[in-house]
Image (tube, rainbow, N blue to C red):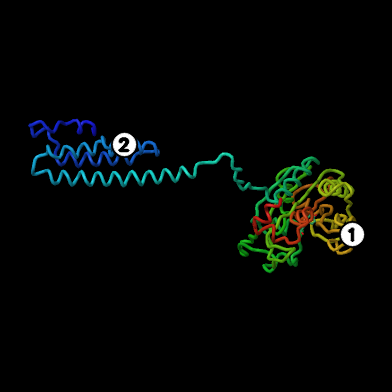
């Protein structure tokens, strides 16, 4: 199109063949947009030569002013002037832009920039390691809802009416009237598991639990528990000890030992608290174990016959054990953390260390 215009022989007498003002205006737009579309420095330079060099199209158009009809000459000249100016300015601007980029050309010899890499959260690392260990011992993983009814949290677990956990001061109720609360322990999953099928049961349930708790370096209102349940014929306390000992040896090393202290839980009889040898001092006594040589990790015991009866399992035929451990505590001891809140603050400086 542009070339076509410039080939018009303006000397010809026929006014039809002379370039009209409108056509010149259109030509101007086309030239500017052609220049503007240049995608490299080299192409801009080509356009400069094509339009602005001595033998370029714009000087050639100037040379044709004399052939334009008199009444149009002035306007023709004005349009050409502005075309030349705008073309110059555009070309200079484009060249400046491209030559800036030239300066920024990629230097392939420079070392690469390090991209931040996401890491697994230490709590979930621990949870998955726990699952792995128990799977190897024949346990499967069970789940249950985090919003529970009083039935699964208290009644079916043989919690007495007077138990403080039933109060709003201890537990987080969604709705006290409908007896819905955030589960305070994963023990509810014991009941849900046993309700669903016949024995034997051999499950663990790692999951979140919630308590109406003031937060400090060892307590948060939300934390994770690891529930365990094994029910079959002739299951004994010795198996409970053996299972937990094997688990802690996997987690903390072969030299780890366990100790059981008598305790009370409504859902087990007999009940015990379980300690492991302090892995910082090896049992000699240090600040971590408060000089006792032992670290407390959770509760356990033989499943109370009432629980089995509550779900229709014959407590004369079947026995079992259960345990509940705090996953944050297991994690803190494994990695030497001293504030549980670090686990939940999502500070990258903390998380990047794992
Ligand atoms: N549910 C108990 C708690 O939250 C922990 C626990 C103790 C679970 C003994 C058990 C158990 O299964 O047998 O403190």
Image point (72%, 43%), residue name: 197
Other-residue count near label 1 (Cα within 10 Å), few / some / many at <14 / 14–19 / ≥20: many
Tell me which image quadrant ligand 1 sits in: bottom right
Q: From this viewpoint, is residue 105 visible? A: yes
Closer to us: 239 or 2: 2
Q: Position of residue 184 (x, y in %)?
A: 70, 59
Query: Image quadrant of residue 200?
Result: top right
Query: Image quadrant of residue 293?
Result: bottom right
Residue bearing the label numbered 2 = 49
Image point (64%, 61%), residue name: 179
Left or right of 211? Residue 68 is left
How far is disc 2 from disc 1 in space, using C-alphas?
88 Å
Q: From this viewpoint, is residue 187 visible? A: no
Kindly report which numbered mark, 2 or 1, lies closer to the viewer in this rendering. 2
Q: Are marks 2 and 1 in contact (CB under 8 Å)?
A: no
Give whichever of discs 2 and 1 has the lower sequence position: 2
Left or right of 142? Residue 98 is left
Q: Is residue 130 above or below residue 163?
A: above
Q: Is residue 20 above or below residue 213?
A: above
Residue bearing the label numbered 1 = 293
């Amino acid at each position: 199109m542009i070339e076509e215009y410039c080939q018009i022989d303006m000397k010809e007498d026929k006014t039809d063949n002379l370039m009209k003002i409108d056509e010149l205006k259109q030509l101007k737009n086309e030239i500017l947009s052609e220049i503007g579309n240049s995608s490299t420095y080299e192409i801009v330079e080509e356009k400069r030569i094509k339009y602005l060099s001595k033998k370029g199209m714009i000087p050639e158009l100037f040379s044709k002013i004399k052939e334009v009809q008199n009444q149009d000459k002035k306007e023709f000249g004005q349009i050409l002037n502005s075309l030349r100016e705008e073309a110059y300015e555009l070309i200079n601007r484009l060249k400046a832009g491209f030559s800036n980029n030239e300066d920024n050309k990629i230097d392939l010899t420079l070392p690469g920039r390090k991209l931040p890499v996401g890491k697994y959260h230490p709590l979930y690392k621990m949870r998955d390691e726990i699952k792995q260990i128990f799977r190897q011992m024949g346990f499967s993983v069970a789940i249950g809802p985090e919003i529970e009814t009083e039935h699964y949290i208290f009644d079916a677990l043989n919690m007495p009416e007077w138990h403080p956990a039933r109060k709003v001061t201890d537990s987080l109720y969604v709705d006290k009237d409908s007896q819905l609360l955030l589960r305070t322990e994963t023990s509810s999953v014991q009941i849900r598991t046993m309700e669903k099928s016949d024995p034997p049961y051999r499950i663990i349930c790692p999951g979140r639990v919630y308590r109406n708790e003031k937060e400090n370096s060892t307590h948060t209102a939300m934390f994770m528990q690891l529930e365990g349940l094994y029910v079959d014929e002739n299951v004994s306390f010795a198996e409970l000890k053996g299972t937990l000992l094997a688990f802690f040896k996997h987690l903390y090393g072969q030299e780890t030992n366990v100790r059981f202290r008598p305790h009370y839980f409504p859902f087990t009889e007999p009940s015990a608290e379980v300690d492991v040898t302090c892995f910082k001092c090896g049992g000699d006594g240090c600040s971590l174990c408060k000089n006792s040589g032992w670290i407390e990790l959770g509760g356990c015991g033989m499943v109370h016959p009432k629980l089995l009866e509550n779900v229709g399992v014959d407590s004369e035929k079947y026995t079992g054990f259960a345990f509940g451990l705090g996953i944050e505590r297991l994690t803190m001891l494994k990695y030497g953390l001293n504030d549980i809140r670090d686990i939940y603050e999502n500070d990258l400086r903390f998380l990047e260390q794992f």
